[in-house]
Image: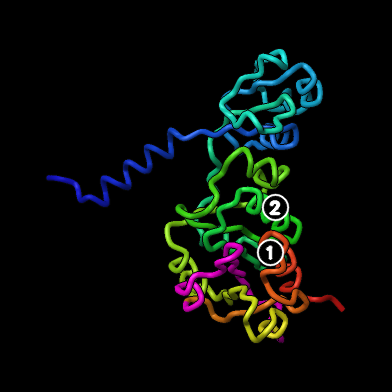
Amino acid sequence: MKKPKWVVEKEQQKRKSAAETLWLFGVHAVRDALMNPAREKLRLVVTKNAHDKLAEAINASGMTPEIVEPRKFSVPIDPQSVHQGAALEVKPLHWGSLAERAITGGDRPLRLILLDRVTDPHNVGAILRSAEVFGAQAVIGTRHHSAPETGALAKTASGALERQPYLRLRNLADAISELQQMGYLVLGLDGEAEQTIEDALEGRQDAPVALVLGAEGPGLREKTKETVDALVRIDFAGGFGSLNVSNAAAVALYASLPRKG
């Protein structure tokens, strides 16, 4: 019996994902990956100088590094990348399902960041750093039209990629609907919105909140605007366009948190 097309495509995608690897570079990104027991590590290439800086992490990882001369440092990364003499080939991290991440909060308020076609790895890396600082459960993008896990993203995230869940799902609207069914209040950032984040959360600061941010320029897609519970703006930003999307994510997360006292 011939398998349905969607089954074949799913199996192909699974095989492709299993074979996929990426190169992390830079001392901070490599150190944090070496120290992450959940990260499958394949090959480590370092200069003597970088090896000395990473000695503790290398010993902890149990890896045997390839030590090379700086002029012979040759790994498949962009030649313009600032690798600092350290590069590590790894498998992508797997953070589980949206449902698993969305309910993991401990005593922290439940907060998620959803990205609508934010493709710049430097922006996503910076957003991961902010999400870690403000205790967000996860950053969520889409499999297509969002920044994949790359060395550039990891370097910008400065280690946060190893600790801050980053999920890429098939369909953003479906993810929003799933979160709404779980009791999340889903707010879309839009500079033209009438109400602020604080307005939308008045009396509901302890509720689970998902903040949806669009790419700089086009912003949220119409489909996304129709799916969220409300459109909100950042109170003191003037227009959303005046803030870089990574800065907007940090400010929006801070504005959404309960105030003490």
Q: As shown in the figure, which amino acid type bears the numbered disc 2?
A: Ala
- Picture quarter containing residue 258? bottom right
Direction from residue 164 to residue 186 in the image, left or right: left
Along the line of sight, which residue is nearer the eye, 5 or 96? Answer: 5
Residue 9 position, x and y percent, is 29, 46
How packed mark 2 is, by other alpha carbons closer than 10 Å (few <14, some 14-19, many 20 or more), is many
Q: Marks 1 and 2, Cα distance to the nearest angstrom?
A: 9 Å
The residue that label 1 is drawn on is: 249
Check the image and report above or below for 79 versus 112: above
Residue in the picture at 67% in, 78% down: 233
Along the line of sight, which residue is nearer the eye, 75 or 45? Answer: 75
Q: As shown in the figure, which amino acid type bears the numbered disc 1?
A: Ala
Q: Secondary structure at mark 2?
A: helix
Q: Are marks 1 and 2 in contact (CB under 8 Å)?
A: yes
The residue that label 2 is drawn on is: 126
Direction from residue 147 to residue 124 in the image, left or right: right
